Image (spheres, rainbow, N blue to C red):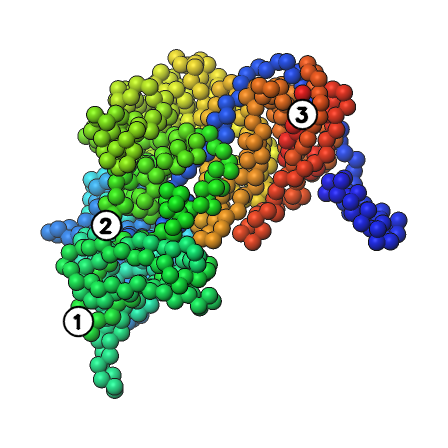
Amino acid sequence: MKNGRCLRMMNRYVSRGVSIFGMMVALVVCIPNSRAAEEVLLSVDCRKSPHEIHERVYGHFFELIYHSCNGGLWGEVIWNRSFEDCSGVGKWSVEGDLLRQSDLATDCRLVLGADAWNSAEWENDAWNNYEYTFEAKKTGGSEGFLILFRTRHPKIFYWFNVGGWQNKYTQLEKSTLFSGKKAIGPQAPLTIEDNRWYRFRVRCEGATATLWCDDEKILEYTDPEAVITTGVVGLGTWNTTAEFRNIRVKSLAGEVLFEGLPQPQEKVDWRYWNRMQGKITAIWGDAANSDVAVRLESIRSETSMGIAHEGAVLAQQNIRVRQNDPLRGSIFARGKGELAIGLYDLKSNLNVAVDMVIDSADWREYPIAFVENLKDADAATLAIDYLDTNGNFVEIDQLSLMADSSRATGGYRPDLLAAIDGLKAPTIRWPGGCFASCYRWKSGIGPQKDRVRHTQNIWDDVDVNSFGTDEFLRMCEKLGIEPILVVNGGTWDKPRTPEKRAEYIREACEWIEYCNGSLDTEWGKKRAENGHPEPYDVRLWEMDNETWGSPMDVSEYCELLAELVPAVKKTDPSITILICGSGGLGERREGQDWNRYLLEHCASLGDYVSIHHYENPDQFADGPYTFEQYIETLKGLIASSSNPAMEIFVSEWNAQSTDWRTGLYAGGVLNAFERQGDKMTLGGPALFLRHVSANDWDNAFINFDQNGWFPAPNYVVMKLWREHYAPHFLTTEGDPKGLNISTAKNDANRIYVKVVNPSREVKSVSLTLTGMALQSATMRQVSPGSLEARNTLEATDAVHVESADVTVDGQVIRFMMPPLSAGVVTVEP
């Protein structure tokens, strides 16, 4: 607690007649540490600036994962609008004696032998102990095969993940409703080659599962918590295409349970959608949008009262509705019958519906508008209701709704757009990240109805490309942000061939032409047709992402750059090229070894080297210095390269938490960036936005649900630092005694001193400023008092900025830094 607050508390006690003894108790409680504050003596010569600080170190990185856009910034209120995010996803087909899966998405599964949701099939002894054999061949992608057994439900199963984790090893995984999916048992060094047939055998006996490949035992594990004792089998892939044949399941008693080739299942579970009643099945390959549509049918039954018909109802929850904010959109449908789409909420008595008559054999778009009789509801239910008594059906696809308030901003959710604007990011990198390494930009332009899903189910999100190139670049124009686009070099598309490389290079060049080309170019004309005649003039282009993780050898990446960079520079010679550097500290493959080879062979091809580093949040104090030393080493490699003018882009950084540790780390690492500003001139942390329901990566700056958002501590600190940016770095002399400090001045000679105290001791700072006369000083500080402090949707301001005391005595400014605090002192000349 600050001294000023202590005095105010004492005054309140005195005014209430509290004794001097009580007053002293209150004062002791206010003191953050019973030991005397440690004195820190520092000095700065305000006349000497060794280097400039580029404001682009305060850039950001916006990746389309964890519902940052769909269900987030983009104003679409429907999740999984095209029904593509579902169990059983994948492009499965039977051709001759082969079962093919030709989708590079994650978690493409097909259940064999029985309906995995029909317990009568798998609750018999035959589906308890059995052997499962088949042959498999990988035809593309980055991993291997998923061999499912004892599958009872989309979330209850075992599988051997063969060649998983970027084709590094094989391991057994188990999924339950309550614990989710997790790896169990030992790892085996089995990886999968392209275009080679493998023979697999799985044996389930009691609690023991055994895997053989080409007659060699690979893994055997006895599950001490074997709660899944029965269930059917399945096949799957993850970021991989494959073929399967000679599939057979035989009980240990000798009964053949399944043999031959399956047909793709109709009955699936759609994520974020709930089957309420009726017959609801999947339509594969003949959808209005992408690959999956939904068929709704009534169920006819005989009762004692006669013939009864149960309608089909599909519903989605957590829809935000506001009385004076109409929702408008559309649905694609075909078939015959009456369809009702309604919004319901018991708490607010919301009950509105739009009725439509479907009578078409072809897909048609039907408008939806909820305008009247709306009520405020934070978590309404949207229901699609179909009832027919004549044996008909209706098929639906791409249901889209957006509030008028979002349409008024250009399609962006107003509160999240304001949250982004609050950071005043000079640059934003987009669309990824790993998302960029399989992003096909042409799927995200033009009418929304024509946009197909992203190729991957990645990071808890199946993106439907609603937020594409134009939406991102228009947002940048709206907020005054310089965009950074990351091209897909085909690094994830395996096997990588010269023909595929040429295709991806051509696509990158066309993307640059779409963004920057004149109206007399093919793609410049297309941009104009999509509503933006003027070129976007995107200058910063990164050549793929984390190429060390694809996996790709650095020499192969250099070969790619040797073809890709000249091609994109020919398309637009004025662009700035960013090439992929390391993804971790140290000398390992993803570290300086990668940078060293890259700079020795490719330095002349790039203007920036792009590096990543994510820190353990417990290293909030030392982590910034460790990373700073890494940057220093990289600067030396650049200096000795053929292109010493190359600069450093820290394109992904953060500490992996949303408590106060990440705020302290953010302040410390931003200070390190300023200290290294002679070469470190471009930055961007991750994650930028994240829905609070996400299943991982709880480190985002902007965290939200359908009703609101809160800033994480890294947002609070980075916003404070950004508001006090100055371009001229000043060297701070003296022993900081654990404080992390950066000092700079602006063109008007206003001084900003940014200080992080990551210790648990109070620091009393005396800073002597020479070379200029001082007039006054102010301080803004964040001091929540605990590493566990955090903001939430219920308490959005628990970690916040407040004023603190600072004095000016001649050329000396004095201020206190409480334990675990961060702050900025502003000195007026």
Residue of label 3: 827
Of the residues shown, which amino acid type is indicated by label 2? Answer: Asn
Q: Secondary structure at mark 1?
A: loop
Q: Which image quadrant for residue 769?
A: top right
Q: What's the residue type where badge 1 is placed? A: Gly
Binning the other alpha carbons within 10 Å of mark 2 as few (below 14), some (14 to 19) or many (20 upward) gives many
Residue at 54% over, 43% down: 712
Residue 201 point in image, percent of width and height: 26, 53
Q: CA distance from mark 3 to mark 2?
A: 58 Å
Task: Residue at 43%, 14% (x, y): give it.
Answer: 644
Indicate left or right for 188 with 517 as reference. right
Please name the residue that numbered disc 2 is placed on.
Answer: 289
Residue named by callout 1: 391
Q: Earlier in the sequence, mark 3 or mark 2?
A: 2
Q: CA distance from mark 1 to mark 2?
A: 26 Å
Residue in view at x 51 percent, y 36 percent: 423
Q: Secondary structure at mark 2?
A: loop
User: Residue 445: percent from the left, percent from the top?
Assistant: 27, 39
Q: CA distance from mark 1 to mark 3?
A: 79 Å
Counting residues from the start of the chain, the first of labels 1 and 2 encountered is 2
Closer-to-camera residue (64/394): 394
Give above or below for 536 relative to 51. below
Rate crowding at label 1 as few (under 14), some (14 to 19) or many (20 or more) other CA atoms within 10 Å. Answer: few
Residue 52 vertical placement versus 486 (above, below): above
Q: Nearer the viewer, mark 1 or mark 3?
A: 3
Amino acid identity at mark 3? Val
Q: Residue 626 is drawn in which quadrant? A: top right
Q: Position of residue 396 (x, y in %)?
A: 24, 58
